[in-house]
Amino acid sequence: MGLLGNELAFAQTLTPQEHEGVMALGHRKSYPADTHLLTEGDRSSHVLIIIRGWVTVSVATDRGATRLILGLRGPGELLGEMAALDQHPRSATVRALGPIEAQVISGDAFRRFLILYPRVSALVMRQLTGRLRSADQERSALASLTVLQRLAGRLIELSGVDPSGPYAPSAAGPSSAAASGPAVQLAQDELAATIGATREAVAKALRLLRTQNIVRTGNRMVQILDPALLALLADGHQE
């Protein structure tokens, strides 16, 4: 599973000329927290480049009200490129985790830009392919792994901890490190959405992890006390 991606953000891969050119195509817009920047099924075709803040990318699941978060995107990330390229309905919903600033570019202008800049077009296609592969992995995990496995793996990922080595904080923003161990700063319902589970199922898994002294929980926080054991659980080893 992977929410964060391992490559540079789109804007960071551009040359100064390319960056100036693509940003000049649009206008800056601010969004309050919890706003839907893009909505699954919508027919719009504009793209966004995040300037400030973080968003979630999610899709509806077969469970109806439950949503599966496929990614967390931050500054420099390009969003909405699939609908801009194929002009089909949006495939996912993008929601602001906090206040957001983004450059909004029309789909027509973005497509013309890619024709003029083939290198940027190749970067967009590589990013799109990587995100599709990651989405497939998330859906596969949803079907084949238990809630405990998915939760353990997600906590390892979001905390940025290396179970076999010293702690190295993730660049993603949702996590922070305290003196006694790394912590993921998400509420239980938000954690549930990142693994496509119910809040009740995540609460049950967290109780099990707490009783084994693997994590400690607080207000919108899960602190990892035993990263190595958490990683074993993510791999399917049972207590």
Image (spheres, helix red, strand yellow):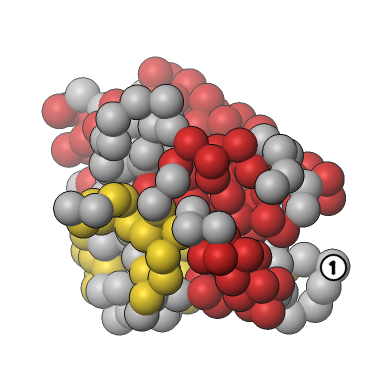
Residue 216's place in the image compared with 226, above or below, is below
Do we see residue 90 in this rendering?
A: no
Amino acid marked by disc 1: Asp
In depth, the one of 53 and 124 nearer the eye is 53
Q: Residue at x 28, y 30 (%)?
A: 166
Q: Residue at x 72, y 39 (%)?
A: 236
Total numbered circles: 1
x and y percentages locating residue 150 in the rendered image: 65, 51
In depth, the one of 140 and 22 nearer the eye is 140
In depth, the one of 68 and 230 nearer the eye is 230
Label 1 crowd (10 A; few <14 / some 14-19 / many >=20): few
Which quadrant would residue 221 be assigned to in this image? Answer: bottom left
Looking at the rendering, in which quadrant would you find the N terminus?
top right
Residue 57's place in the image compared with 207, above or below, is above
x and y percentages locating residue 60 in the rendered image: 72, 68
SS label for mark 1:
loop
Q: Residue at x 41, y 79 (%)?
A: 35
Q: Residue at x 64, y 58 (%)?
A: 195
Q: Which residue corresponds to mark 1?
A: 62
In the image, 233: left or right of 101? right
Do we see residue 61 in this rendering?
A: yes
